[in-house]
Amino acid sequence: MKKFFKWLGLGTGVVLVLVAALVINSIWFRPIFIEVFFERAFLEMGLKSPQALSSLRLLEGLGIRGHNANLDDLSPERTIWFADQIEGYIETLATYDREKLQGQKALSYDVMNFFMRQQAGAREFMWHSYPVNQMGGVQNFFPIFMTTIHHVGDKLDCEHYISRLSQSPRYFSQLLDDLRLREDKGIILPRFAVEAVIEEMQGFIGVPAEENILYTSFAERTEPLEDLEPGEREQLLEEVRQQITGSVYPAYQGLIDYFVALRAKAVTDHGVWKLPDGEAYYATQLFQHTTTHKTAEEIHEIGLAEVERISAEMDAILTDQGLTEGTVGERVAALGNDERFLYPDTPEGRERIIEDFQVLIDEIDAGMSGLFDLEIESEVEVRRVPEFSEEGSSLAYYMGPAQDGSRPGVFYLNLRDIHEHPTWSMRTLAYHEAIPGHHYQTSIQSELSGVPQFRKFLGFTAFSEGWGLYAERLAWEAGYHPDPLSDLGRLKDEMLRAVRLVVDTGIHQKRWTREQAIDYMARYTGSRLSDVTAEIERYMVWPGQATAYKIGMIKILELRERAKRELGDRFDIRQFHRAVLQNGDIPLFLLEREIDRYIEEAAAA
C-alpha cells in the first residue's frame, strides 16, 4: 500500500489523511469494502460479549486481555440491542451489490444475509426460549465457563477470575430481570424443569466453598503457575473462597428463591404450543435448526419412515446374534444390561471409559488419509461432564478449541450411569463427537483462511449435527465397526436421531404428553428409562434442535449420491468431503449449491 501511494506521488502526510479517512469511514459509516463491513459487524457483536471473546481468544495474542475480567450483560436491554443491530446490519448489507461479488465474498454475503434475516424473522419470539433450564442454561454454563473456558495461565488471569466471580450478583440480577419479563409474557419453564434446576442449584451451593468446582478447579490450575510470589497463591485462593461465599452463593440463592416461587405457576403441558403463538414459534425453530422449509408434519413423516427402516436393520443383526425374543427395543435394552459389555461401577471404571474413548479417537485419527485430504492442528481430549450437572445433561457434548491453541477441543462424556456406555455403543459416540465428527469439522472451520472471522464461528445446527451423524455412518463404511454389535450401536444411535423427528414434532406440534414421548422412544431405542427421560425433557426445553441431526445427514447423503451418480469414476470421496467442509458451517441450501458447483467443476476437469 505504501509503495502504491508513493507511485501516485503522494507524500506521507497525505497518506496518513487518506488512511485516517478510511478508518473513520469504516468505523462510523458504511464501509467502502464489504470485507470491512463483515469484520466490523463481527467485532461489534464480539465486543458486547466478553465471555465470547474469552472463548475465542482472538485478542490475547495482541496483548488485549481486559475483557477476561468481565461477565456478559444479560439484561433485557441487551437482547433488544442485539435485535436492533441485526436489523441495521440487514439494511447495510443490502447496499452492497451481490451480483458483483464472487467466490468467498459472495458466499460470505449469502451466509450473513441468511443468518441475519433468519434472526430478524424470529424477532417477535425473542423471549420465547428458556435461558435457565436443566440442559444447559445460564446457571449451568456459568461454572462450566469459569472452570473450562476462562484461561488461568498467570497472575493477571487469576485476578480476572476473581473479578468475574465478584460480578455474579450483577450477572444473575440481570438474568432475573430477563426471567421476570418472560414470566409476564407467559413464557414459563415446565414444572419438571423448574424442579430440576432448583435441585441442581441447591446441590451446587450446598457444599463448602473449598469443595465447590469453582474453587477446586482454580486451585488445580494455579498450582503450576510460576509468576506467583510466595504466599500469593494462598491469598488468591482465599479471595476465590470469599467470592464464592459472598457473591456466587447469594446470587444462586436469589435464583433458587425465584424458581421456588415460580413453581406454583409452572404447568405440566410441555410443548411450546402452550406459549403465546406457540405453533408459529415452533415453525421458526424448525426453520432455524434445519435451515429448510420442511413443516412439522413432513418432518414427523420422515421420522416414522426412518424408524421403520432402521428397526428392520437392527432386527436383522439381533436375530443373527440369536437374540429373537421381544421387540427390538426390549432386546437392545437387555443387551445394554449385559455385564459382559459394562465397565465396573467405580471411579476406576469411569476412568477406564474415558481412556478407552481416547483410544478409539486416536485409532481413527491415524487412518483418516483415505477419507480426507484436509488436515487440522487442534487436538481433542475426552473429559467427564462436571458431576454437579450430570443428571440433567445429555449423554455427551463437544466444545471447540480456542483460536490461540491454549485450549483443545473437548469431548465431554456423561458418566452418571455406566449402563449408558456399554462397550458395543462407544465407537459411534466417539466418531460423532470427535473424529471425524464435531472436532474434525469444527477445527476445519475455525482454521479457515481467507474468510471473514464470523465464518469461522457461526453455526448452523443442521450442518454441524448432520455432519456428526454422517460421520458415524462414514466410520462404519470405512470399516471402523469391526463386529455386528458395534454396528448395532451405530444403528441404535441413528435410531435415536430418527425417533427425535417423531417425538419433537409430536410434543410441540401434535401435543403429545411427556409419557407418550417417553414410551415411544423407549420402545424403539432400547435406551434406559433414565436416559430416555433426560432426552425427552431436553426436547421440551429446546424445541426443534433435535430434528436437525437426521435432516442434515439425509441431505449430505443425498448430495453424495448425486455426486457419485453424475461423476461416476471421477468421484473421489476425499474431494467430496473437502467440498462439504471447506466453507465451514453453512445452511443446507447453500451446501447444495456448493456441491453442485463441485460436481460441475469435477466433471469438466
Image (tube, rainbow, N blue to C red):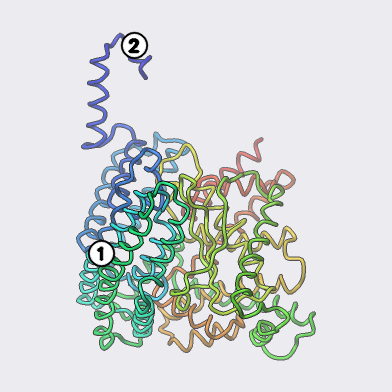
Where's the C terminus, which quadrant?
A: top right
Q: What crowding class fits label 1: few (fewer than 14 Cα within 10 Å), some (14-19), or many (20 or more)?
A: many
Q: Which residue is mark 2?
A: 6
Q: Amino acid at mark 1?
A: Tyr
Q: Which residue is mark 1?
A: 171
Give the residue at x 29% y 32%.
Answer: 32
- As helix, strand or loop, the secondary structure at mark 2 comes to helix
From what the image shows, is residue 498 above or below residue 437? below
Q: CA distance from mark 2 to mark 1?
A: 52 Å
- As helix, strand or loop, the secondary structure at mark 1 comes to helix
Left or right: residue 482 versus residue 198 is: right
Left or right: residue 574 versus residue 268 is: right
Q: Is residue 524 visible?
A: yes
Q: Between 466 and 147, which is closer to the camera in this rendering?
A: 147
Q: Amino acid at mark 2?
A: Lys
Corner quadrant of residue 264: bottom left
Which residue lies most toward the front here? 230
2 or 1: mark nearer the eye: 1
